[in-house]
Amino acid sequence: MIKGLSITPPILGRISIGKVIERNGKRLPEKDDQFTITTQIQSRDGWVAHPYDGDLRQNLNGQKLRSIPIRVLFNAPQLNLRAEYCLFDRKNGRPLCVGNGEYCRRYGESGITSLPCPSPDECTFSDGLCKPYGRLNVKIGDDDDLGTFIFRTTGYNSIRNLTARLHYYQAVSGNMLACLPLQLRLRGKSTT
């Protein structure tokens, strides 16, 4: 097996909270207060909606989609939710530096080097552009046994809450996390 290769389940689509809008000739992200389930296909108008999105919205009577029934594939929380610090190249979207708070792998002129990773606040390389980056893989529906939808987040609170809940549910279920029917819920929160 190739060393350092991330093994991930097949991704059928995305779960997002927001969309990309065009303002002053620039494409900018805009937050939303509901989930959107899309395929992996993007058109000129944005990501193409997945049929599950329409199915879940049918029963809402015009309300917003703020809860999605899900299952996870693995009993180990760290296999379902991966989180790390990432610095992305703003031009091509590729990661320049990926770390865990202890060590990082940084792409440079001489290739990839392993260095100490202080944290986003103390990193001199990133100029404040390094963020936590979490990816949660979940199953929606029963059409595909191993296909998942991916929820990406750069929020500390989202990553911390998802990690804590997955660990709690693993403990409560006696290490049978993959057998539990769960819900991904969107809750409002205000910050100063």
Image (cartoon, rainbow, N blue to C red):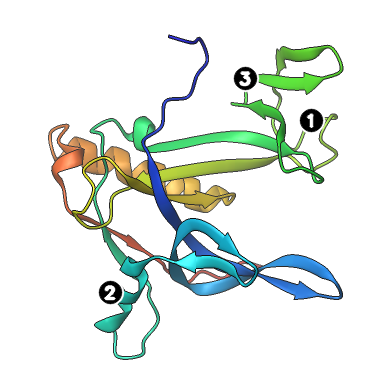
Residue at 28%, 74% in the rendered image: 55
Q: Residues within 10 Å of mark 3 (few under 14, many from 20)?
A: few
For mark 3, what is the residue? 102
Q: Is residue 136 left or right of residue 27?
A: left
Q: Position of residue 13 (x, y in %)?
A: 42, 54
Q: Quadrant of the N terminus?
A: top left
* Amino acid at dot 2: Asp
> Which of pointers 1 and 2 indicates the residue nearer the eye?
2
- N-terminal of the two: label 2 or label 3? 2
For mark 2, what is the residue? 55
Q: Position of residue 135 (x, y in %)?
A: 48, 43
* Amino acid at dot 3: Glu
Q: How many marks?
A: 3
Q: Which mark is residue 138?
A: none
Q: Is residue 14 left or right of residue 56?
A: right
Q: Secondary structure at mark 2?
A: helix
Q: Is residue 190 left or right of residue 120?
A: left
Q: Residues within 10 Å of mark 1 (few under 14, many from 20)?
A: some
- Foreground residue, 27 or 100? 27
* Amino acid at dot 1: Cys
Residue at 22%, 58% in the rendered image: 141
Q: Is residue 17 left or right of residue 161?
A: right
